[in-house]
Image (tube, rainbow, N blue to C red):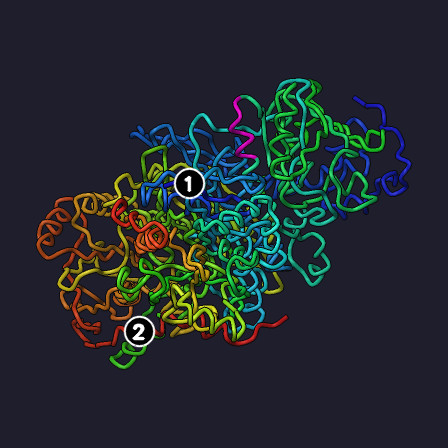
């Protein structure tokens, strides 16, 4: 098992995501610079939170053109695991690896708050049976308002692609959607931060189970090894 | 000795004769102009006049405050343990540095951006955050936390709401993007800040001892690099702007407010830290903050005892046709000056190319002791560097006690009716809903306070606590800011003592051993003897408390001329204190955790009404003397509290501050667990009910102690001479019930919490005024 955390210029959750996997789950983890051309054989590619390229345009709009994105697309096309958190989720939507888009919070302000989230039955590993019916993770974003057209939403729901929903919608997301996966089940994205909910002193440590569930959706044997 | 004049400049603007009017327009006094001519041996050019005006402004030179600031202790007076030694002292560099053990250290400092925020709240506050972050990574430290200290007029004013919303959004915009968590702060609302808000921002970073960098230009022939954003016309003369009073014309100063780019700052942090990690590459580094290129060049030369020569044609510029005056005085943000070891130019250029940033070779270090600036082949400035820095003028201003103090000091509550039962029931929710006391959730939910995943105690408790990764060891930093300007208005010396002891108390309540202090002195016009009196007395108070508690000052900032049409602000010497927690188990919060825990009041029954929020809210009075301070008693209390926390006896600790005992008790119930409390004060001596419940006597803390530990804690308090009284217990169920010798009352905690939690949100639903 080998985790690659992408560093874009303006990534600021890169340390968080690195330590979620490296310290939290004890997995071999390394950084990959956005100008690199290859991922060096990663099992999971994580796109961290932050403001890639400043996000002065639309969030993720420039990051999708970073050189590393070609390797990430190829990795995903081969069925490799890709996981975007916060800005990483925005970039994956912008790159077309996940459906929909994230726009400004309905309240028009940044929100950094703890959220109760319901776990949706999505994969065998990412399900209420595995994670429990609800978990708590913090959000920290200004543009987490998930949008998708009606047809797209129907497909998401029909394919059980919704991973998490907010118990109290903090940003106006359609269907209170907080996180989704692609149809194939190898690309995951969510606005809440498991990478800020895993230390002993954090208000919630549910981030560990969420990271494990993402990994176990593709590598079922992992559940045992990191438990 | 007369010197040869500089060659005439073909630019007619730059070549204009220096008239007394021009000198006055630069805020330079006639005697200061005479000193400039003497230092140069000839009249200055326009560019040189501009350079002197910003370097000799209060913001850069501390000319009115330097003699006062000398009273601050800048080193530990007593022996240090495994941590706490001062590694870089206040005033030596951009920020002071304190040892935290294991070969690691922290750098921290607070700085104001008051005037820019008054004129342009969003950009003013945003660039204030950017500036203080640069001061920290300039030292070689990775920024790990931000806090801020804000003061506004009353929230009922639409102008205040516009400023408040803009300042908070600006701090959020910058801090969130740059990826440094904003973990704490304080916000007060008082009429005296109407039109002149205070925006003080603090940054703290961590580094190993061997990573400490200096802002000194050494090594003749070493190349001088300019890195970061290009120079524009924004922020022209911002330092000078910050050193005059706000007026109707201040809006016309908008070009003096800079525009921030937090993405550029994030790249600069990473590129600079990467560059500094290359052994032996960086000789010196300094950010271009106030007075931009001017300040960074002359200060690095002055510190290095060298000279510096720069060529302005090589400075990256984002506008065409900028003359030397504009380039030297620009305060465009996100720029740094770096002095590199000669022969290693390719290495720095490679780092900055990786991050797609400018790294322009603009000059070199010389042995002349002079700052020489050239543009288009012509020398436009040639100044002895120390004349701009160490030899800047110093003034001893006149101080006079304001006449109102005799009146307020003599006030007693004898003429006021005491609280009755109905008044008591009403008073608690109203005080909790006062914006100064109410939850600041509306503010901190806009700040990313969890990025870097080290935040252990989030905003809303007595102090924020953040984990430090020191190699493979972890320690925790507690940080609090404080200053009640109302106390400083009523008694400047005592108000400053209170700012210190209360801030220390907050840090100790969180389980930390205090390390060091940084201060931001926000005052009125120093040429007014009453304003200078307040400044002098406050500085005396801070210095006295720093010595008594052996908490050194690692640096800070002075912001004068905080006046608007209404007059001077309340004197506001904002204090921020950092403490160290070596064991995660000692982290303590203000929130009660379990029903049955005993509530113990430390420090004795409150008995003073002067300067309280209660007097202001219920009697419309801002009078009386500030509460008394007994530093030996305070020290005994804090030592006792820390010992009990380390012994594991304290479930929660919360100090009494604005709103007094009952407000503090209620706030302890606003944690995650739905709890109540039964409080019985009938055994306490209380001449007045209002003073007991809502007075703001200092040196008081309420602790929650598991019942099995209560007797031992009370006995230990008695043996240490700390007054301690069992005043009841945390209760299951959601009621706060109170019994005193003369009254009884009960409140629903959920209702109290709603009043406290939603007050600012509700106020901010009303429109602001543009």
**Subunit under mark 2:** B
Would you call the spot at circle 1 few (<14 residues within 10 Å), some (14-19), or many (20 or more)? many
Residue under the image location 81 percent in, 39 percent down: B46
Quadrant where the N terminus of chain B sits is top right
Residue B53, horizontal then vertical, whole percent: 71, 41
Secondary element at tag 2: helix
- Residue B533 appears in view: no
Magenta segment main secondary structure? helix
Secondary element at tag 1: helix
Residue B17, horizontal then vertical, whole percent: 87, 40
Residue contact at pointers 2 and 1, CB within 8 angstroms: no
Q: CA distance from mark 2 to mark 1?
A: 39 Å
Residue B368, horizontal then vertical, whole percent: 71, 19
Of B331 and A131, which appears nearest the observer?
A: A131
Of B129 and B740, which appears nearest the observer?
A: B129
Q: Give the mark nearest the N terminus, 2 or 1.
A: 1
Residue furthest front in the image: A78
Of B147 and B454, which appears nearest the observer?
A: B454
Where, by quadrant of the figure, is residue B328 drawn?
Answer: top right
Residue under the image location 48 percent in, 37 percent down: A40
Residue under the image location 52 percent in, 22 percent down: B279
Label number found at residue B752: 2
Which region is colored magenta? B272-279
Residue A81, relative to residue A134: is it above or below? above
- Residue B351 appears in view: yes
Residue B577, relative to residue B173: is it above or below? above
Quadrant where the C terminus of chain B sits is bottom right
Residue B277 lies in magenta, yes or no?
Answer: yes
Label number found at residue A164: none
Q: Which residue is mark 1?
A: B543
């Amino acid at each position: 098992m080998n985790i690659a955390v992408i560093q874009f210029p303006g990534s600021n959750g890169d340390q968080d995501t690195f330590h979620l996997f490296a310290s939290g789950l004890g997995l071999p983890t390394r950084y990959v610079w956005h100008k690199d051309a290859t991922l060096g054989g990663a099992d999971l590619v994580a796109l961290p939170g932050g403001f890639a390229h400043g996000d002065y345009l639309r969030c993720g709009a420039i990051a999708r053109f970073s050189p590393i994105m070609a390797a990430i697309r190829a990795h995903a096309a081969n069925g490799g695991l890709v996981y975007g958190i916060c800005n990483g989720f925005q970039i994956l939507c912008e790159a077309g690896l996940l459906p929909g888009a994230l726009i400004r919070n309905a309240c028009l302000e940044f929100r950094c708050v703890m959220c109760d989230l319901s776990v949706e039955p999505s994969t065998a590993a990412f399900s209420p049976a595995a994670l429990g019916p609800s978990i708590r993770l913090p959000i920290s974003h200004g543009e987490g308002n998930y949008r998708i057209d009606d047809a797209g939403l129907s497909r998401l729901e029909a394919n059980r692609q919704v991973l998490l929903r907010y118990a109290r919608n903090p940003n106006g997301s359609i269907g209170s959607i907080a996180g989704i996966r692609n149809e194939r089940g190898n690309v995951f994205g969510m606005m809440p931060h498991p990478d800020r909910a895993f230390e002993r002193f954090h208000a919630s440590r549910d981030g560990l189970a969420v990271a494990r569930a993402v990994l176990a959706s593709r590598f079922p044997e992992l559940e045992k090894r990191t438990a | 000795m007369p010197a040869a004049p500089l060659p005439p400049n073909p630019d007619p603007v730059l070549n204009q004769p220096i008239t007394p009017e021009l000198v006055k327009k630069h805020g330079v006094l006639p005697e200061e102009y005479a000193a400039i001519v003497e230092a140069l041996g000839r009249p200055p050019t326009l560019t040189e006049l501009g350079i002197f005006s910003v370097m000799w402004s209060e913001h850069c030179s501390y000319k009115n405050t330097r003699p006062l600031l000398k009273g601050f202790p800048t080193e530990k007076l007593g022996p240090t343990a495994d941590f706490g030694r001062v590694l870089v002292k206040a005033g030596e560099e951009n920020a002071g540095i304190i040892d935290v053990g294991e070969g690691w250290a922290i750098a921290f400092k607070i700085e104001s951006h008051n005037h820019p925020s008054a004129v342009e709240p969003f950009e003013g506050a945003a660039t204030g955050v950017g500036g203080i972050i640069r001061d920290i990574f300039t030292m070689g430290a990775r920024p790990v936390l931000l806090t801020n200290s804000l003061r506004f007029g009353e929230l009922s004013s639409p102008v205040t709401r516009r400023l408040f919303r803009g300042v908070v959004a600006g701090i959020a915009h910058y801090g969130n993007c740059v990826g440094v968590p904003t973990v704490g702060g304080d916000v007060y609302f008082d009429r005296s800040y109407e039109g002149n808000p205070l925006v003080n921002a603090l940054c703290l970073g961590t580094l190993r001892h061997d990573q400490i960098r200096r802002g000194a230009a050494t090594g003749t022939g070493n190349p001088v690099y300019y890195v970061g954003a290009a120079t524009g016309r924004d922020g022209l003369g911002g330092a000078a702007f910050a050193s005059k009073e706000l007026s109707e014309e201040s809006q016309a100063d908008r070009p003096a407010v800079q525009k921030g780019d937090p993405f550029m700052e994030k790249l600069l942090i990473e590129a600079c830290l990467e560059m500094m990690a290359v052994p032996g590459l960086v000789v010196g580094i300094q950010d271009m903050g106030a007075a931009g290129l001017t300040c960074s060049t002359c200060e690095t030369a002055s510190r290095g005892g060298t000279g510096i020569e720069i060529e302005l044609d090589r400075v990256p510029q984002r506008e065409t046709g900028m003359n030397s005056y504009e380039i030297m005085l620009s305060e465009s943000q996100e720029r740094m000056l770096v002095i590199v070891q000669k022969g290693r130019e390719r290495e720095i250029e490679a780092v900055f190319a990786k991050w797609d940033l400018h790294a322009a070779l603009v000059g070199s270090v010389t042995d002349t002791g002079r700052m020489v600036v050239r543009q288009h082949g012509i020398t436009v400035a040639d100044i002895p560097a120390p004349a701009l820095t160490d030899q800047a003028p110093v003034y001893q201003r006149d101080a006079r006690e304001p006449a109102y103090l005799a009146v307020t000091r003599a006030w007693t509550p004898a003429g006021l009716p005491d609280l009755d039962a109905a008044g008591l029931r009403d008073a608690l929710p109203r005080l909790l809903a006062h914006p100064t006391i109410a939850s600041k959730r509306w503010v901190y939910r806009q700040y990313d306070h969890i990025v870097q995943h080290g935040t252990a105690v989030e905003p809303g408790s007595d102090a924020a606590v953040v984990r430090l990764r020191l190699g493979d060891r972890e320690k925790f930093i507690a940080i609090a800011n404080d200053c009640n300007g109302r106390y400083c208005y009523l008694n400047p010396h005592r108000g400053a003592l209170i700012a210190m002891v209360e801030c220390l108390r907050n840090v100790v309540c969180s389980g930390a051993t205090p390390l060091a202090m940084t201060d931001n002195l926000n005052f009125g016009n120093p040429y007014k003897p009453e304003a200078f009196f307040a400044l002098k007395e406050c500085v005396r108070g801070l210095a006295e408390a720093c010595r008594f508690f052996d908490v050194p000052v690692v640096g800070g900032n002075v912001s004068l001329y905080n006046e608007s049409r209404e007059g001077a602000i309340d004197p506001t010497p904002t204090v921020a204190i950092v403490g160290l927690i070596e064991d995660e188990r000692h982290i303590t919060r203000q929130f009660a955790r379990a029903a049955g825990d005993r509530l113990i009041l430390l420090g004795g029954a409150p008995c003073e009404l002067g300067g309280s929020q209660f007097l202001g809210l219920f009697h419309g009075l801002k009078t009386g003397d500030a509460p008394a301070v007994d530093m030996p008693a305070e020290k005994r209390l804090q030592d006792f509290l820390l010992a009990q926390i380390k012994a594991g006896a304290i479930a929660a600790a919360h100090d009494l501050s604005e709103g007094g005992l009952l407000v503090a008790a209620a706030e302890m119930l606003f944690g995650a667990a739905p709890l109540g409390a039964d409080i019985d004060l009938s055994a306490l001596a209380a001449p007045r009910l209002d003073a007991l419940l809502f007075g703001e006597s200092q040196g008081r803390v309420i602790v929650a102690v598991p019942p099995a530990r209560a007797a031992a804690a009370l006995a230990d308090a008695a043996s240490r001479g700390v007054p301690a009284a069992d005043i009841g217990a945390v209760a299951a169920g959601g009621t706060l019930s109170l019994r005193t010798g003369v009254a009884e009352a009960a409140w629903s905690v959920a209702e109290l919490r709603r009043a406290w939690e939603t007050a600012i949100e509700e106020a901010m639903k009303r429109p602001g005024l543009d």
